Image (spheres, rainbow, N blue to C red):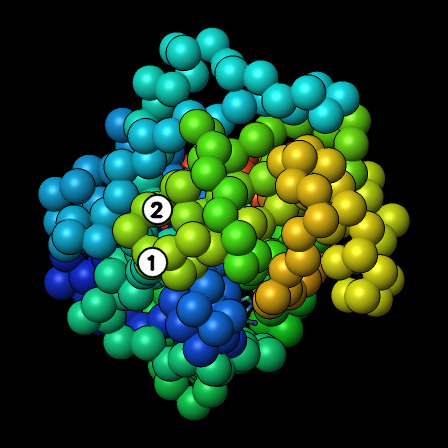
Amino acid sequence: MAGLGAARTLRVAGIATVIFEKSRGLGGRVATRYLGDYAFDHGATVISPRGSELERVILEELPTDELVDVTAPIYLAHDDRVTAVDPEGGKIKRYAYAKGNSTLGRLLGEGIESRLEMRVEEISKNGPHYLIDGESFSHVILNPPIPQSEVLLASLGDKRSFPGAQYRKCLSVMFGVASEIDRPYHAILDPNQSQPLTWLSLEHVKCPGGFRAPDGHAAVVVQMSARYSRYSYERSDEDILRETWVDVKRVLELGKVGYEVSSVMRWRYSHSSNTIGFETANPHGAKVLVVGDGLSGARTHQAYETGVRAARQILEDI
Ligand SMILES: Cc1cc2nc3c(=O)[nH]c(=O)nc-3n(C[C@H](O)[C@H](O)[C@H](O)COP(=O)(O)OP(=O)(O)OC[C@H]3O[C@@H](n4cnc5c(N)ncnc54)[C@H](O)[C@@H]3O)c2cc1C
């Protein structure tokens, strides 16, 4: 998101920009996994941009035909008791994309030159220019999680390091269920993280219309607590799926139901838990800038904002 925020801002200003992305698509942790007829947002589940630049872009610049205004509320779970929340919370605008939130990365990246499946291992210098895979640039914006950006800075001989930027691990577990799970909420949150299962999203309720699961089926994504994720990170998928399914069935009171597809995603850097200031990371005049939620807080729109800010700093510089 941060890299896309930067690239779009530079493009609007007429500056040629290239994105290097190690994955097959753009969007990073705003990601969707497709399994059979199911679609799961196993990264960011909703985008609640709260009047930010990203909200303006989503509503005014990008196509909105696949944009879903998520109206079903979030309920709270306390010791497995699921209760409705203060209705004021429901007033926060939450968006998702019908076929998967990875749509956002694709839409933001349209028209921007991108080298996909291209992991940047090092950056070198050639006079005033920076070389990435043989291509030459006046400025570089680094969007990997901060510890990985530090490795790229080191490849340049740049000694900046940011031990203050910290992230937590998160296991996202997905289940496609051949049975109706109809509820008045799209997600349940355990704010105290007292149980392993801290967030449960009913993808087919969040985005109705058969995009996330066939009619009469259910697509469930659960995010495990920081403690469980840390402890279980190296354990087998089989163990994680078995334990998590027991929890899902108990919380949703499902009885003897099984699942037909499943998957586990291990996010090593899921959410920034401690951030560093933008100015600390990026002194004025820096040609290589660092962006992302390690500077801002773990929200899509906040990460996007750091990219926009980096682009503006570069525009001032040139
Ligand atoms: C499970 C989970 C649930 C979340 N839920 C929400 C939510 O509901 N709402 C919300 O607003 N936010 C949520 N977030 C947080 C949000 O997704 C992130 O804060 C935000 O997307 C981070 O964006 P970023 O640009 O900082 O980093 P990333 O999205 O991590 O982007 C970094 C990009 O750099 C690429 N990359 C890394 N290293 C290299 C390399 N060497 N070469 C080339 N490319 C590289 C990566 O593939 C990735 O595309 C969630 C995150 C997770 C993991």
Q: Position of residue 62 (x, y in %)?
A: 16, 52
Q: Quadrant of residue 253?
A: top right
Q: Which residue is mark 1?
A: 211
Q: Quadrant of residue 163?
A: top right
Q: Residue at x 33, y 76 (%)?
A: 114
Image quadrant where one finds the C terminus: bottom left
Q: Amino acid at mark 1?
A: Phe
The number of numbered discs placed on residues in the rendered structure image is 2
Q: Position of residue 25 (x, y in %)?
A: 40, 72
Q: Position of residue 311 (x, y in %)?
A: 31, 52
Relative to residue 26, is residue 270 drawn left or right?
right
Label placed on residue 235:
none
Q: Amino acid at mark 2?
A: Cys
Quick one: 46 or 99, which is closer to the camera? 99
Q: Mark 1 and mark 2 in contact (Cβ < 8 Å)?
A: yes
Q: Residue at x 54, y 79 (%)?
A: 119
